[in-house]
Image (cartoon, rainbow, N blue to C red):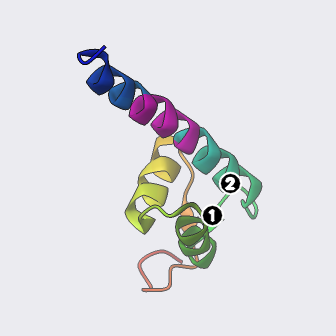
C-alpha cells in the first residue's frame, strides 16, 4: 500500500482542482453584469474561493469574459 499513497494524494489534488475550476466558473458566470465581470466582483470571488485574482482573470479569459470597471483603470 505504500506506493499508492502518492497516487491517492495526486488524484485528490486533480479532482479537487477540477471541482475548484468548476466552482470558479460557476461563480464568474453567476456574477456577470451585461455579460462582463466587474473587477471588484472578481476580487471578491478570489477571496471567497481562496484563489488569486490572477486565477479568476485567467478563468474569465478562458471563458471569453471581459473584465469591466477595472479598479486600476486598465479596462473601462
The N terminus, quarter of image: top left
Under circle 1, the secondary element is strand
Q: Which mark is residue 49?
A: none
Please give the name of the residue rendered at 61% of the width and 45% of the height, measured from the top-left corner.
Answer: 25
Comparing labels 1 and 2, the label whose residue is closer to the camera: 2
Q: Position of residue 44 (x, y in %)?
A: 60, 73
Under circle 2, the secondary element is helix
Please give the name of the residue rendered at 54% of the width and 44% of the height, measured from the top-left corner.
Answer: 20
Q: Position of residue 67 (x, y in %)?
A: 54, 65
Name the residue carrying label 1: 37
Up-down: is 2 above or below 64? above
Q: Position of residue 13 (x, y in %)?
A: 40, 35
**Residue at the outermost left position:** 3
Magenta range: 12-20
Label 2 neighbour load within 10 Å: few <14, some 14-19, many 20+: some
Up-down: is 33 above or below 28? below
Please give the name of the residue rendered at 44% of the width and 31% of the height, measured from the top-left corner.
Answer: 12
Label 1 neighbour load within 10 Å: few <14, some 14-19, many 20+: many
- Is residue 61 visible to the viewer in this orientation of the structure? yes
The C terminus, quarter of image: bottom right
Please give the name of the residue rendered at 27% of the width and 26% of the height, measured from the top-left corner.
Answer: 6
Separation of marks 1 and 2 at Cα, in angstroms:
10 Å
Instruction: Say which of 73 and 63 sits in front.
Output: 63
Q: Position of residue 48 (x, y in %)?
A: 61, 67
Name the residue carrying label 2: 27
The quarter of the displayed image where residue 39 is located: bottom right
Amino acid at each position: 500500500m505504500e506506493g499508492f499513497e502518492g497516487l491517492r494524494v495526486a488524484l485528490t489534488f486533480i479532482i479537487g482542482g477540477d471541482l475548484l475550476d468548476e466552482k470558479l466558473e460557476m461563480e464568474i458566470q453567476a456574477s456577470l453584469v451585461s455579460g462582463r465581470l466587474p473587477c471588484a466582483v472578481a476580487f471578491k470571488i478570489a477571496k471567497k474561493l481562496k484563489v488569486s485574482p490572477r486565477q479568476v482573470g485567467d478563468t474569465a479569459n478562458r471563458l471569453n469574459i471581459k473584465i469591466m470597471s477595472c479598479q486600476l483603470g486598465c479596462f473601462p
